[in-house]
Amino acid sequence: MAVSAPVLAQQVPDAPPPEAPPVEEAAPVAEAPVARELTSAEITAFNKAVTDFTAGQTAQQKGDNATAIAKYDAALPPIRTAAAADPSKIDNVNFLANALYAQAAAYGALGQMDRIVPIYDESVPYWRKLVEAKPTDTASRNILAGILIQLGNQNLRDHDLGGADPFFKEALTLARQTVADQPADAASKNVLLAALVGASQTGTEEGIRDEAISMGQAMIADGSIDAINRPQIDTMTGAPATEG
């Protein structure tokens, strides 16, 4: 015998009158990732990854970047697995962020700049999580700001001002906070200056260019400007190029 559907299940809600705005469905709430324990095989692989990463660091310090990259390539998959298994374990997130950063540095030392941007793209969420988890860690904040500046610069090279702007804005917020925390630190000031120079080229915020020039000139005067920012400020002010 056929079973009829319940009456309520067959009813359709009345449509709103024509002048009423459409009823919007609530956005689904994203579920927090479910943590899990690593399997014994994954633990073994992770322990080997620690050994590979350490060997990569040693090779990189000796200038053997090709070997370092090979070691990082071997180490990264198990580190990714560990970070994904339990995102709340900040030590694993930190390990992954730093391994990616070291890998990018090794490629940069070999002049393989095209390999760096995808690595930076992958690393950004992990650095953001680190900065959120450790709000007083100025080193992580500077690294994240520096990565964002590089991603913004890549968009500028691709003539994508709209794509560059969010990276520079985020970097500016981070760098301003760090300089406020340690105003005498030259490295932090150079990160902020680089973010200002980048943001000045997207042209979306009033006064950024003037701020970059003013800060750059002050840093030239006190000798704290670095070799990357100096040519940018010279170009912006029309000053003759300095010889290294």
Image (cartoon, rainbow, N blue to C red):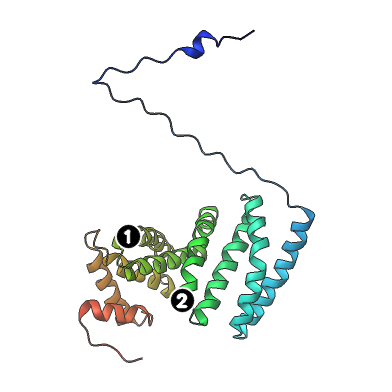
Distance (Cα) linking label 2 and label 1 = 21 Å
Instruction: Measuring from the top left, give residue 11's x and y in whole percent.
Output: 45, 12
Quadrant assignment for the C terminus = bottom left
The foreground one among 145 and 7 is: 7
Quadrant assignment for the N terminus = top right
Instruction: Measuring from the top left, give residue 241's x and y in whole percent.
Output: 27, 87
Disc sitting over residue 113 in the figure: 2
Q: Is label 2 in a helix, a strand or a loop?
A: helix
The residue at the far right in this view is 40
Identity of the residue drawn at 61% across and 85% down: 64
Identity of the residue drawn at 69% across and 76% down: 55
Q: Earlier in the sequence, mark 2 or mark 1?
A: 2
Identity of the residue drawn at 77% across and 61% down: 44
Instruction: Measuring from the top left, give residue 211's x and y in whole percent.
Output: 26, 67
**Viewer-nearest of discs 2 and 1:** 2
Quadrant assignment, res 231: bottom left
Quadrant assignment, res 2: top right
Disc sitting over residue 165 in the figure: 1
Instruction: Measuring from the top left, give residue 117's x and y in whole percent.
Output: 46, 68
Q: Is residue 105 above or below residue 123?
A: below
Q: Which amino acid, by three-letter code, is at mark 2? A: Met
Q: Is label 1 in a helix, a strand or a loop?
A: helix
Disc sitting over residue 233 in the figure: none
- Mark 2, Cα crowd under 10 Å, few <14 / some 14-19 / many 20+, is few
Q: Is residue 81 above or below residue 75?
A: above
Q: Which amino acid, by three-letter code, is at mark 1? A: Asp
Tell me: 220 left or right of 92.
left
Give yes or no for contact between labels 2 and 1 (Cβ–Cβ under 8 Å).
Answer: no
Q: Is residue 17 above or below residue 47?
A: above
